[in-house]
Each structure stands twice: as C-alpha cells, then as structure tokens.
Image (cartoon, grey):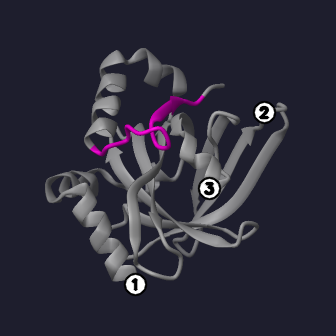
Amino acid sequence: MESKILQHYKEYIGEKELDILLKRFDVKTFCDKWNQVITSRSTSFLGSGGSEYSSVRANYSLTNDNKITVFNECYDEKKQYKSIKGTSDCFDSSVPTCRTVLFPSVGATGNYWILYISKKKDVMIVCSPLIIPHTSIKLMDNFALYVLAKDRNKFWSNKQMVQNIYAILEKYNFNNFINKPIYSGV
C-alpha cells in the first residue's frame, strides 16, 4: 500500500518537480516554525483549519531518534487557543517529501505531500490527498492544501512569491469550491 501511495505522489508531482523538491528538501530546514498563510475549505474536514481558525502555526522538531514531531497551534472562531501534537514520517527515505502525519488524539494517519519548496526554503506548499483509509485507492490528489511560510509578513509583502504560489496551486488544480485557496488570517 505504501508503495502505491508513493507512486500516486510521484505521478501527481511530476518527475521534474520532484527532482527540484528533493534537492531543496532538508530535514533541518523543515524542522522549524511555519505560519499558515493560505489554506482550503477542505482542511475543516481534516480538523485542521479552514477559515474558522486563525494564527495557525506548525512547529516541526527533529528528535534524537530522527523522527519528526509535529505541534500545531491556532485560535478557533471563539479566539480560544487550540493545539495538537503528533508525528510525521516518510514512506521512503529516498522521497522524504511524501510524508504521513499522525495525531494520536485523532487516531488516524493522514498523507502529507510537499508540493513545493521555495529556493530560499522559507515557503512551502503541502497538500493532503483523499485516499480511502487502509487502501491505496486515491479519490483525489488535491483534497486539501496548506501554504506555510516562515515569516507571514515577508510572504505577503513579496508579490512575486504570492503570484508564484497561486500559479502553482492552479497548476495542481486547486480551483474548485472545496480545495480553492483561501486566506489564513492572524
């Protein structure tokens, strides 16, 4: 099943783009604090966002045994602080951008596909495909999206980067009501 999901990822990303991603991905750069700047309505179904959450931040840390811990935090629509802890792993160490994420409190492992990493490694696009649990049956490559930036203000002030991100999202068909990019506010 894992090899089939990895195959889905490679087909969706494309060979050229995957080569670029693998050259840019560095676990130490990845393990940092990231601010969500753009998301999709569909992330609400995953319990991780949508327009009802603000100041969404993902914190990734590398443990002594080379595992990645995930600590996500935000404020809900009532301005109450929320957080969730989990872990992230890759299906195959040769393709560390095709990942899983597990939040024990939710009890399900999700797919976490990195689509894009900027040259400066300060912006990335992550998507969640829709795959039937315990199978390799993919219903949708681009179900949910997260655009993460190390510096929210720097991202929005760089008009060229913002345009580039929207062009990439269009290329990967993030353009229907459920997965269309929406602003993730502070």
User: Which amino acid does the dot numbered 3 rest on?
Assistant: Leu
Please say whether residue 20 is one of the residues in the magenta stretch: no
Q: Compare marks 1 and 2 and give the one earlier in the sequence.
A: 1
What is the span of residues highlighted in magenta in the rendered image? 172-184
Q: Residue at x 70, y 72 (%)?
A: 107
Please say whether residue 178 is one of the residues in the magenta stretch: yes
Check the image and report above or below for 53 versus 105: above
**Marks 3 and 1 in Cβ contact (< 8 Å):** no
**Which residue is label 3 attached to?**
46
Image spot of residue 74 (x, y percent): 72, 40
Residue 118 visible in image: no
Where residue 82 sits, quadrant-wise, is top right
What distance separates the C-alpha of mark 2 from that of mark 3?
A: 16 Å
**Which residue is label 2 attached to?**
77
| Rendered-image quadrant of the C terminus | top right
Image spot of residue 39 (x, y percent): 52, 38
What distance separates the C-alpha of mark 1 from that of mark 2?
A: 37 Å
Check the image and report above or below for 81 versus 99: above
Q: Secondary structure at mark 2?
A: loop
**Which residue is label 1 attached to?**
1
Image spot of residue 58 (x, y percent): 60, 46
What distance separates the C-alpha of mark 3 from that of mark 1?
A: 21 Å
Q: Is residue 79 left or right of residue 66?
A: right
Q: Secondary structure at mark 3?
A: helix
Q: Secondary structure at mark 1?
A: loop
